[in-house]
Image (cartoon, helix red, strand yellow):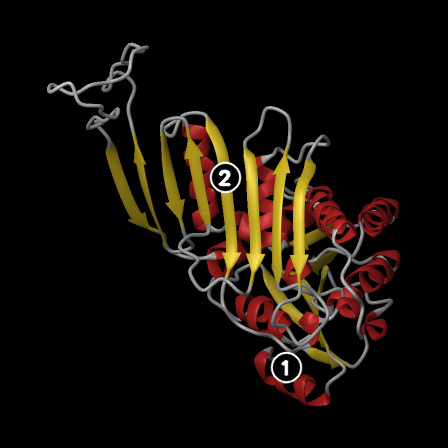
Amino acid sequence: MRKLRVALIGQGRSGKNIHGKFFRSEDNKLFDVVAVIDFDAERRQKALDLYPGCEVFETYQEIFGRKDIDLVVNSTFSEMHYPVSMDLMKHGFNVLVEKPMARTRYECEDMIKTAKDNGVILAVFQQSFYAPFYQFAKELMASGKLGEIQQVSIRYNGFARRWDWQTLQAKNAGGVYNTGPHPIGFACDILGFSDEMKVEYSKLACCQTSGDSDDYAKMILTAPQKPLVDVEVTSVDAYAPFNLKIVGSKGCAAISVRNYKMKYIVDGENPEKPVIWEALKDEDGEPTYCKENLITHEEEGEFEGTAFDIGTKKLYDTVYDAIVNDTPLPIGPEHASKVIWVIETVHAQNPLERKF
């Protein structure tokens, strides 16, 4: 099985500590980093040690004309995802772009069209779709164990402040653009990426960040014949007990990145009780309330691996298959475009003051 030759743009937190970490790991059997691009000279020098035999460049335009590069990973600043990816695809490169894919749905569709017009692969790095905890959640919802799913609550919450470029609207940043593609991606997936999906309610706020973008976000999404999906992305929640909570007609599951627990009933074990129209009384004739000891079942367990190891490897496997075997991406740019539509809609519903 041949290895693909990769050019990696950016040696920041994503480029070095996520993509680079995977490329340097034993999990990587399919890719060789042959070029690293970064405007910072110190980072370029370090890259020579991290990726033996690679070449380093200050600008991505310096690789134009190279026919020996199979994939370019675009892990630039968020506001550069669209223009840099467009430029690369127009010069014949397959591109894996970091999330967020772009700022607007229009930019996403423009990227998709450009990829098709130039006969190249465009993929978006939303590896959380392949994380063990989310794959488990999808299988659980499909199994029927919890009955008909009524609501899914998704929480990507914490309690912390930021003051870097990821807090600036000018950098296409903030909680919803930065972290949001993961939980909003799950929501879109649960809703079948429906064209009839709606943002029924949303709220954004800038609470403690030093920048001018959101660090609190709430969204309620719906689609016909699908569960209600309640999404939060906030940095001002000190008590976030789960990442996903699934509420069905027969039970409930609380799922975090590392573990899960669930409680449910089984058909036939709790026969339906007849409706009583009169006021309930106990044996002494005193008013009472409906109460019984339901026969329930409980399960719990832990997950091995996260989006940053198993999820990253699985996503890169799909990119490899798309380039080498022309296999359609399970989660492609068309799906990521729907995610950006939600984010764009939420920002349109809640315009924040631009301060920088």
Q: Is residue 191 above or below residue 236?
A: above
Q: Left or right: 331 with respect to 151?
A: right
Whichever of labels 1 and 2 marks the residue nearer the N terminus, that label is: 1
Q: Residues within 10 Å of mark 2 (few under 14, many from 20)?
A: many
Q: Quadrant of residue 34?
A: bottom right
Q: Give residue 341's position: percent from left, percent from top.
A: 75, 46
- The answer to whether marks 1 and 2 mark residues whose Cβ atoms lie closer than 8 Å is no
Q: Which mark is residue 13?
A: none
The C terminus sits in image quarter: bottom right
The mark lying in front, picked from 1 and 2, is 2
Q: Is residue 183 visible?
A: yes
Q: Is 237 in front, or is 37? A: 237
Q: Give residue 233's position: percent from left, percent from top.
A: 57, 56
Q: Residues within 10 Å of mark 1 (few under 14, many from 20)?
A: many
Q: Left or right: 275 with respect to 94?
A: left
Residue at which label 2 appears: 152
Q: Is 320 in front, or is 207? A: 207
Q: Give residue 62's position: percent from left, percent from top.
A: 84, 75
Amino acid type assigned to the residue bearing label 1 in the image:
Ala
Q: Give residue 69's position: percent from left, percent from top.
A: 74, 64
What kind of element bears circle 2?
A: strand
Q: Is residue 1 visible?
A: no
Q: Quadrant of residue 213?
A: bottom right
Q: Is 294 in front, or is 336? A: 294
Residue at the spot 57% in from the left edge and 28% down from the top edge: 226
Amino acid type assigned to the residue bearing label 2 in the image:
Val
Residue at which label 1 appears: 47
Distance from the alpha carbon under mark 1 to that under mark 2:
42 Å
Q: Is residue 85 above or below residue 264?
A: below
Residue at the spot 61% in from the left edge and 60% down from the top edge: 216
